[in-house]
Amino acid sequence: MEKKNYTSQDVAEVAGVSQSTVSRVFAGNTNVSEKKRKKILAAAEKLGYKPNAHARSLITRKTMMIGIVMRNIRNPFYSAVLEIFHNRFSALGYHLIFINSENEEIQESEVTQLLEYNIEGVIITDALLSSSASEKFKRHGIVVVLFNRYTEQLESSAVFCDNYLAAKQIATYLVELGHQSFAFVSGPSDTSTTIDRLKGFKEVLQERSITNLMIEPGNYTFESGFKAAQELMTRNKNIDCIFCGNDIIALGVMDAIRTIGLRIPEDVSVVGFDNIRMAEWPSYSLTTWEQPLEEMVDTTVELLVNEIGDTNAEPQIVMMKGHLVVRNTVKSRK
Amino acid sequence: MEKKNYTSQDVAEVAGVSQSTVSRVFAGNTNVSEKKRKKILAAAEKLGYKPNAHARSLITRKTMMIGIVMRNIRNPFYSAVLEIFHNRFSALGYHLIFINSENEEIQESEVTQLLEYNIEGVIITDALLSSSASEKFKRHGIVVVLFNRYTEQLESSAVFCDNYLAAKQIATYLVELGHQSFAFVSGPSDTSTTIDRLKGFKEVLQERSITNLMIEPGNYTFESGFKAAQELMTRNKNIDCIFCGNDIIALGVMDAIRTIGLRIPEDVSVVGFDNIRMAEWPSYSLTTWEQPLEEMVDTTVELLVNEIGDTNAEPQIVMMKGHLVVRNTVKSRK
DNA sequence: TGAAAAAATGAATGCGTATTCATTTTCACA
DNA sequence: TGTGAAAATGAATACGCATTCATTTTTTCA
């Protein structure tokens, strides 16, 4: 019932050994006789002793802490991302400090505070993070790995889906099914995911000399998808196909289209991106692009842990493939 | 470009002052002349100095870290919860260590590790956490606040919605609209939310001498709701009303009912609980109970911070109300 | 049984900071 | 200009631990 936090010194006194030996037991060092180890563990149990991670980190220079900064945890794709990351890091003994930027740029102060904790690495999902902040991490020897995002300069490792290629394949799929009039509902125009997905999509249409492409800005939310579709469908009644920047947008698009009284896929085809769980809900049954989420996370963790262990490791860019998941929101128009 | 982590001693040497004075500047102590403060800040800037939070915490006995343990971050309700908690704690300078139990009991080892970090408090949402673990937190002087969950013994503060009363009001609403044959799709039967919601619902029916209540177990997921509804509707074709343990279940229930070919609300009324964002998506437009999320979080943070500051503070149980949000999944049957 | 090697142990030290206490400097005011 | 009070400063210390180094104990094997 004591509130006091006992120290290794306290345990040492109870067990009748030196503090060094207690430390050795809890640091996993093997050079302790079985007899004393038993005694020490008993004493520790009796006092309710636990090592102090901060004092330990001061010496070992390991905090076993990882920062994870996200832009919008309410996007189900990122909820899943967080779950899997926690899963993996937890198994490795790392702890996650969670930062959400809520669609705003991460505060400089938050970066600073993260630095003061001496986290060993940080995963930056598509969060808005000024390059100065990113630079700050690197300057202090904190490993940075970008997830589902990258920058032009090869300064940090990055893991993401080949959005460009994926968009090309999706476009090809849609064109070959005979669609004629296209629309793209984008995410924020300053994100690499949006840029690449649009680029790939556009290129295929150009190759096929299709000029009917309307682009409507969104921000990776249901509401923005809903509004975008309303806008699109009233401006151009001929649109027969909408490619959405991500699944959540696609769901919004679908609801808007149905609200107008049109049918999917009979009147309009819709394709999403991510393959979040809701995409397979019967109400939507959305055809979409599946990102290999688990593999992406695994790779990210691997890179991060590797760079933590080897300060000379070169940054790596890993691009993964993914594949089309065909459900019921696209119809052949031939 | 230096990788070295400079210390306050380094800064002191560059600025030509003592380490104490540097410390005073960064600890916000006012007793430093403007002249030296400028010098010190300049030196710190030049070196890229940042205080070491761990060394600091060793002395101040404050870590500014809060643990948050959740059961299922993929449930949109909890994504929102996490976002808001981060929002509030961030503003107060606290950092969040995120733990997800993934529908399993939290590992004893994770609790232990959390303890070693000397977190100042922990928020436990409806996660499965043995009482031994909870006891462990308390024994080490870590403030525990339960969120959306409580235990019989008044050992920790708790903040939650009055599920019992809410369920009674929902039941009353449904009965008075003339429903006759009821079903309840529950969450895990060992959670206080499930128990209370069922209890309130049952009581009203009993008062009105209605015996037509089927109870189908679920686990707060879409899939469990879907399966439960399939089961229910094939077993009893007369059911005209399904009360769901939470919104995600309700969405699953709705999709299952529609898949069977029945209409909502014409054939079956559906009511959810939580009022997650998807509840207002046009495809569902779900009538549900809104929990006052922001207020619940605010209260939780308040209690936690208060108890951190005052070790003699008594645990408090705060029950909040919420209200029915009427949309389009319930029909009058009179 | 004895010597050398191996294992176990403890004393001492430092990680980077905040804080106390004693000392020095600055300031206000006569 | 001188005095006392207030402000500023630095030396020393402690926070709780891991680790090094020297010493003691145990084990191994001839």
Image (cartoon, coloured by chain):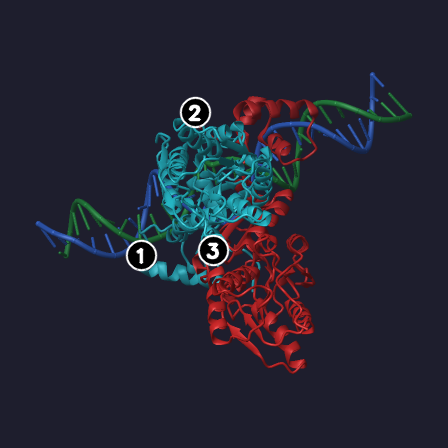
Chain colours: A cyan, B red, C green, D blue
Residue B144 appears left or right of A267: right
Query: SS of the residue at dot 3?
Result: loop
Q: Is residue B298 visible?
A: yes
Q: Give the quarter of the figure containing the C terminus of chain B.
A: bottom right
Residue type, numbered disc 1: Ser
Chain bearing tag 3 is A
Compute the Cα span from label 1 to label 3: 59 Å
Q: Which mark is residue A2?
A: none
* Total numbered labels: 3
Percent from the top left, x then y, of residue B164? 65, 70
Q: Are dots 3 and 2 in contact, CB under 8 Å?
A: no
Compute the Cα span from label 3 to label 2: 40 Å
- Residue at left 54%, top 44%? A253
Question: Do badges 3 and 2 share one subunit?
Answer: yes
Q: Are dots 1 and 3 in contact, CB under 8 Å?
A: no
Q: Which mark is residue A153?
A: 2
Compute the Cα span from label 2 to label 1: 54 Å
Chain bearing tag 2 is A
Label 1 or label 3, whichever comes before in sequence order: 1
Q: Nearer the viewer, residue A53 or B80?
A: B80
Give the crowd class for mark 2: few <14, some 14-19, many >=20 residues within 10 Å. Answer: few
Q: Is residue B120 visible?
A: no
**Mark 3, mark 2: which one is toward the viewer?**
3
Residue B78 appears left or right of B333: left
Percent from the top left, x then y, of residue B83? 58, 48
Q: Which residue is mark 3?
A: A281
Question: Do badges 1 and 3 share one subunit?
Answer: yes
Q: Which residue is mark 1?
A: A33
